[in-house]
Amino acid sequence: MLTNGFFARLNIIDVGKRGKGQTPGSARNLPDDILETAKWWADFTPGGGNFMSQHPKTATVRFTPDAETAITDLRTQTEVEYDKADDDGDEVARAAWSRTCEHAKKLALIYACSENHAEPVISVAAVRWASEFALHQTRRQLYLASVHVAENPFHKECLKFMKRLQDESTGILSRRQIMRTMKMKANDFDQVVQTLVQQEQIKAVWIESKTKPAQGYQINLD
């Protein structure tokens, strides 16, 4: 799913912790302008004719000249990222960057249709908003993939170790704290630690305490 185009076609919005529940109240009355706009879209038939449902004719929404320049700049930017991924042999990143500009175009279209449903035009403001959103989403999805997707069981444990450190605000945890989270045999745990140290992803540290220093690990930022 990460390399066949499915992942790249999604906009995955990850959120924080689930909030508290609430009891539903009475139905809210929607503003008249929202209802009118919704009815306008429900009745929208740009091609007209009796066979519209079988042979629809799409409407075309144009870019302003500045917006067209902005979307071209975005395409150039994403092509640079695509080439970097291609040079690195990173199939996941290559697939994700190949769709980023298309995501931005669709988002810009939604922006334009929300701004003026009767006569939409894709403005430079729409492209800028859509570009920022699409770029953030691509980078965020690639980060989440790097954190959660493993190539084998051992790699999965390495990712779990790194995720535990990254979730800690200080980026430092004692050996005892991480071992409780990992729930592994000491020998297997030490293999994960040794691998991550050799990869220079973490480094061993001593953590001061009220009694005596404790052995721990820290994300390597060097």
Image (spheres, helix red, strand yellow):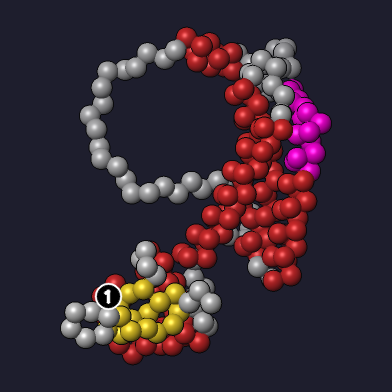
Image coordinates of residue 86 in percent, x first then y, are 73, 66
User: As displayed, is residue 64 above or below residue 204?
Assistant: above
In the rendered image, residue 61 lying in the magenta stretch gets the answer yes
Q: Residues within 10 Å of mark 1 (few under 14, many from 20)?
A: few
Asked whether residue 153 appears in the rendered view, the answer is no
Horizontal relation, residue 211 to residue 3: left or right: left
Image coordinates of residue 164 in percent, x first then y, are 37, 69
User: As displayed, is residue 192 above or below residue 149?
Assistant: below
In which quarter of the view is residue 81 placed? bottom right
Image coordinates of residue 74 in percent, x first then y, are 73, 46
Q: How many marks?
A: 1
Range covered by the magenta-colored residues: 57-72
Asked whether residue 114 appears in the rendered view, the answer is yes
**Residue visible at 29% across and 72% down?**
181
Mark 1 residue element: helix
Closer-to-camera residue (190/176): 176
The three-letter amino acid code for the residue at tag 1 is Gln
Horizontal relation, residue 75 to residue 182: left or right: right
**Residue visible at 66% across and 57% down?**
95
Horizontal relation, residue 221 to residue 177: left or right: right
**Residue visible at 65% across and 65% down?**
91
Q: Residue furthest left?
A: 211
Image coordinates of residue 219 in percent, x first then y, are 44, 74
In the rendered image, residue 107 lying in the magenta stretch gets the answer no
| Residue occupied by mark 1 | 177
Q: Give the position of the N terminus as an image quadrant.
A: bottom right
In which quarter of the view is residue 139 placed? bottom right
In which quarter of the view is residue 186 placed? bottom left
**Residue visible at 51% across and 48% down?**
12
